[in-house]
Image (tube, grey):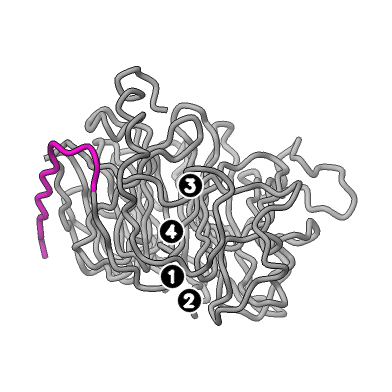
Amino acid sequence: MTKSILLTLAGAAFVIASCQNKSSENSDAAEKDSLATTASGTPVETQKANSDYKPSFEGQTRIGGVKSTTAYEGKVLYSDLKNPWGVTILPDGRLIITEKAGTMRIATTDGKVGAPITGIPAVNSEGQGGLLGIRVDPEFAKNRMVYWVFAETRPGGNLTSVAKGKLSADEKKIEGAAVIYRATPAFPSNLHYGGRILFDKKGDLVISTGERSDTVSRPQAQHLNSSLGKVIRITKDGKPVAGGPFEGKSGAKPEIYSYGHRNVQGLAFHPVSGDLWEVEFGPRGGDELNRIEAGKNYGWPTITYGIEYSGKKIGDSIQVKEGLEQPVYYWDPVVSPSGITFYSSDSIPEWKNNLFIGGLSSMHILRLVIENNKVVGEERLLASEGQRFRDITEGKDGALYAVTDQGRLYRIYKK
């Protein structure tokens, strides 16, 4: 199936829009001049918030809307993927995609999708589990190594695991697959695995985990002897990266980079600053965008801008506490933010260094304009598609590629 959506966006500086929520640096002077006006635009979110909590600083939520002035096209390249979850780029520009039940597939940028790749260890695909985030080795052209995150059944329950293996020369199987890291402890829940994975500039891995959702496991996001609710840094062999913020600290896992997270499903490095950014699910309200710094505590579940799904308050119902980091931005109602990518291409200059986020319950792609580590504008893309956008990445051709829970692969590029 092939479908095109021609979206000609011209003229206006602001967008006045709303999209039904289903539930739960820039560097040059011209860009800075234009951004100076964005915060006064009408916010794209018009629905009532779930809580009466107030932001801690101006622009922390419901920032003014912006509107792309470049004509772009969103095209469905393929529509029969089986619950795709992660997508990343191969050195030749093709895509490698994970499917939740436990398969990987290679796709071309014109929509040709290969057969499922075999040799992948069994995954637990119940609930929010499955075969999750994926990245290829920076030296893939030489070693053909692939790294992925998955939900694994272990004694005592399930957990978030990281594995690696070699893609065969014929691209039909993964050879020598091995688990290199397990986010312990295991817990009998099929929710909140986190599951994103990145390579940093040094060739080490950054992965995200969830706190497994249950009120029993939730406090472990604050515990340094637990891998739950964390951003983790490990080597290609699964060992803690030397010099981590908790190295040598008694009772702390040395691989922990940051903590106090709920369920991180988006990780990306800023193309200019190199800073690590993440998005994570809030409960009922309180989805967050954070800039991650080593050793910092991001608050969950002690502080939050959300409430329980039942409507009850969470913990002491506080949003600010000394020593706990504030989100750069939050959403209430939720957008259910999943995979993210910064746009670094010159193809659409106004998108340069903007952050693009796949929205699940919100069923659109979010574009955030970020300046001096603050969100100064927000736009919703492909909102008419009715798709749960699970992951998004930038291709070598300057296009954005996104996958949806319903099985679609999109290419989003300049018209």
Left/right of residue 141 with respect to residue 7 in the rendered view = right
Crowding around mark 4 (Cα neighbors within 10 Å: few <14, some 14 to 19, many 20+) is many
Contact? badges 4 and 3 (CB < 8 Å):
no
Residue 282 against residue 251 in the figure, above or below: below
What amino acid is labelled 3 in the image?
A: Met
Contact? badges 2 and 1 (CB < 8 Å):
yes
Residue 307 image offset from top left, x and y in percent: 57, 71
- Badge 2 is on which residue? 125
Residue 36 against residue 171 in the figure, above or below: above
- Badge 1 is on which residue? 102
Q: Which mark is residue 145?
A: 3
Which numbered disc, 2 or 4, marks the residue that appears first in the sequence?
2
The CA distance from mark 4 to mark 1 is 22 Å
What residue range appears in magenta? 1-15
Which numbered disc, 4 or 1, marks the residue that appears first in the sequence?
1
Residue 354 image offset from top left, x and y in percent: 36, 37
Residue occupying image coordinates x 75% and y 48% = 322
Looking at the rendered image, the disc whose residue lies closer to the viewer, 4 or 3, is: 4
Looking at the rendered image, the disc whose residue lies closer to the viewer, 2 or 1, is: 2
Q: Which mark is residue 337?
A: 4
Contact? badges 2 and 4 (CB < 8 Å):
no
Element at label 3: strand
Crowding around mark 1 (Cα neighbors within 10 Å: few <14, some 14 to 19, many 20+) is many
The CA distance from mark 2 to mark 1 is 8 Å
Left/right of residue 402 with respect to residue 337 in the rendered view = left
Quadrant showing the N terminus: bottom left
Residue 260 image offset from top left, x and y in percent: 68, 56
Is residue 9 in the magenta section? yes
What amino acid is labelled 4 in the image?
A: Pro
